[in-house]
Amino acid sequence: MNDAVTDSQRDYHDTVFLPRTSFPMRGDLPNKEPLILAKWDKMDLWGRLRAASVGRPLFILHDGPPYANGNIHIGTALNKIHKDVINRTRQMAGYDANYIPGWDCHGLPIEWKIEEGYRAKKNDKDTVPILDFRAQCRAYAADWMAVQATEFRRLGVEGAWRDRYATMDHGSEAAIAAEICKFLLNGALYRGLRPVMWSPVEKTALAEAEIEYHDHTSATIWVRFPVVRPSVPALNGAAVAIWTTTPWTIPGNRAVAAGADFDYAVIAVDAVAETSLARVGEKLVIAEALLPAVLRDSGINAHRVLAVIKGADLAGTVMAHPLRGAARADGGYDQDTPLLLADFVTTEAGTGFVHIAPGHGEDDFSLGRANGLDVPETVGDDGSFNAWVPLFAGVHVYKAADPVSAALTEAGTLLARGSITHSYPHSWRSRAPLIFRATPQWFIPMDGPHRIRETALAALAATQFVPDQGRNRIGSMIAARPDWCISRQRAWGVPITVFVEKRSGQPLRDPAVVARIIAAFEAEGADAWYASPPSRFLGPDHDPNDFEQVMDIVDVWFESGSTHAFVLEKRGLPWPADLYLEGSDQHRGWFQSSLLEAVGTRGRAPFKAVLTDGFVMDEKGRKMSKSLGNTTAPDEVADKYGADILRLWVMSSDTSEDLRIGPEILKQQAELYRRLRNTLRFALGSLDGFSEAERVAVAEMPELERWVLHRLAEIDAKFRAAVESYDWTGVYPELHNFCSLDLSAFYFDIRKDALYCDRPDSARRRAARCVLDQLHRYLCTWLAPVLCFTAEEAWCARFGDSASVHLEQFQTPAAGWRDAALAAKWDTIRATRRRITGPIEEARKANTLGSSLQAAVELPLNADHEDLLDAAAWAEIAIVSSVTLVSDTAEPPARVTPACGDKCARCWRVLPEVGSSADHPSLCLRCTDAVDSGLVRKPAA
């Protein structure tokens, strides 16, 4: 009986080197990522990174502190992921990237949250002992710091989490106080009365960065200021008309401003509408350019122009306050009102005159100071008129429009009333409208002997900005900003550690006092300021009865702007930092406060470079809002897709512009991720069993392999340029295209045949496996900063779980890999290849072919291209069974016909030689040799 297995019965499947790897096709990131995080914690990855980095050049990205209040949002996730990628790329480029994350813990938002609890119980916060209140704020911030640290870690953000910083740490509070005292001791800190943005709800001054603008409907009034001493005869018996959107500022009026170059008309009113407050026969002064609008709005139907006067000629005119002689005012408004000239007056709206209330506007204050006007304190800290304000004591400014208009009507000086919807400043926390209010505050001067503005602008010129337009944005803000108001009338923060001499009103500038304060804060924190008698700080040389202890806290932007002092200098890290990275809104926030603080104390910027991200919008480009239901929560993305998908979204975007995110965009990112993962999986599977014995010298490799190495060298150069410039725009999308187009759709597709079917000692297969080894190493290290979990999984799938890709550095290509001539040649080959693949796809659509291996191709080539490849190489590159080369200068598309011969049972090529081997009649000669060699994965059954 003959038991021999015939060739038609043999199964050659196991003789083929199909990919084999433990790296699965499905990422399952939501479940795997926490396990990888646990592995990093167990192996102390951060500690091992620091130990391995000893001796390397330090790279310091100083972390702008997020606020310890609530779960992180998508903008915070963008910021922290971007920082993490920058740090990881620098670490893998050979630097010691020691990243110290931190938190901003003081300030109004946390106070507001604690006060909400009091309000809910109808308790008065002001009755709570300040140390108890501060303790509750501290506990609240500590809780949220812990929550956010967990959320950041879940996103794969690596850093010195056990050595983080917080502005409420005792050492931090001591350092912030020390920075305040540097300004005190060098004379660049003064107390002055001037208008600041004030929140009546929160009862404190606010910084520009704590303000947001919303549409607001304001009452508008047109008011007569009767002329009592004219500068020219034409003004006799006239009234100057002003227009304002803040009726509540009328009690604080001390002047009226005109534009020197404008033409002003003196008109006589001849007829008015029935409901108009204007009077027939009266004389009014209005800017000629605005006359039609004022006549319409005030209901004046007919008028005569009596005279036209240049604004400059109005100077010296004196008017009566519009409430002069008002009943029950007890002469409180009987002062004269001078007419002054000012360059901030415009004819864009109103009457061409601006009523000046020095206590309620920056321009008003500056003009009043220049002309010796008094600055009345009309409004209290809760937004109500002070008890000494005639007619309006106790009235809240938000509700003042009606009583002010009524008083003006009774006095005969209200000309008209209306309303306007306009962009108006609001508190970002309470969402309540703000007011300008003159209060005694502590300031750091921008100009004068310390030249902070001038030095800051010079420092910006020497700073690298990414993108570069950030320099102009922050520069224009610095150039126009007023003196820095650093005082806040709150409780949760670092106090302004100053004593003021009661006799002179001057701050005490005593280094010994400062030293005692800093020592106390180092030991006990800023609570010491509230828990200790003044004598503890003043010492034996000063009588506490002679001094007022300042109880204002410092602006939280000053605090965060001082972090460079205790995160970098105090820890012995390089100063200035290499990089500050935040959103573009921080040009008016942290970037600016850090710059001004460092310039004022050290004479230079605390950063070498500034990198800014755009804002995150929804998929339609709308601002995210809970009310719109268009928010994207980072934890939900991590739970559904995995943190690597969110990280890929960040680095696939142009972070310098506004970014968009939503369900469809995340699905797209998941698809990009799938392609990257499949590239890694193919490389790993094809490297199964790879050993150093397979190494082939680059010079001995086929051109296709050398072209892949050239592409690696090209991309490596872009990576290294991005590491230094911080501009990663387009780098990771190009890496994706390399994986998708150059590798999966081209190189892998071509080399599958050699990898699967060549005998293992063939030069072609060995060269391909050597290149795959490089591809795996390069791709894993390039992807590790972004796909930190996936790259770790792909690395450990080959090198074992005890390894970590994050302990590696970027691979360094050999000098000989770059070959521009070879690259140009293969650009031509790939373009020519498309003349083959196009007709094959058409044949497949027409059902005349199944796979490309069923095709025989006739390829027309002109004289320039005849020597690119021989026919066998073209067949290999086009993945067809045979190619015939013909000369044709026009190079039309290739002609595709079914290949002659039989299909090889092992490699599936259709060749006439199939059947020529008696032992393996269903195989081609190459496959016969491979099977007979005994070197295949498993003998044929």
Image (cartoon, rainbow, N blue to C red):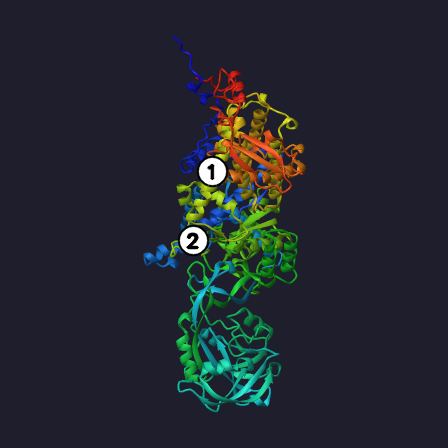
Most extreme residue toward the left is 121
Task: Residue 295 in the image: state x and y as whole percent.
Answer: 48, 83
Residue 715 disc label: none
Which dot, 2 or 1, sits closer to the camera?
Answer: 1
- Dots 2, 1 in contact, CB < 8 A: no
3D distance between C-alphas at marks 2 and 1: 67 Å
Is residue 94 in view? Answer: no
Is residue 848 in view? Answer: yes
Question: Which amino acid does the dot numbered 2 rest on?
Answer: Ile
Disc 2 packing (10 Å; few <14; some 14–19; many ≥20): many
Is residue 799 shown above or below 488?
A: above
Task: Residue 698 in the image: state x and y as whole percent.
Answer: 64, 28
**The C terminus is located in which quarter?**
top left
Is residue 671 shown above or below 210?
A: above
Q: Is residue 459 left or right of residue 150?
A: right
**Mark 2 — residue?**
110
Name which quarter of the figure residue 860 lies in. Answer: top right
The residue lying toward the viewer, choosing from 609 and 235, is 609
Question: Which amino acid does the dot numbered 1 rest on?
Answer: Arg
Q: Disc 1 on helix, strand or loop? A: helix
**Mark 1 — residue?**
844
Is residue 708 shown above or below 70?
A: above
Q: Disc 2 on helix, strand or loop? A: helix
Task: Residue 821 in the image: state x and y as whole percent.
Answer: 67, 37
Question: Which badge, 2 or 1, comes first in the chain's sequence?
Answer: 2
Task: Residue 375 in the image: state x and y as whole percent.
Answer: 53, 72
Name which quarter of the figure residue 857 lies in. Answer: top right
Looking at the image, which residue is at 63% across and 62% down?
447
The residue lying toward the viewer, choosing from 84 and 875, is 875
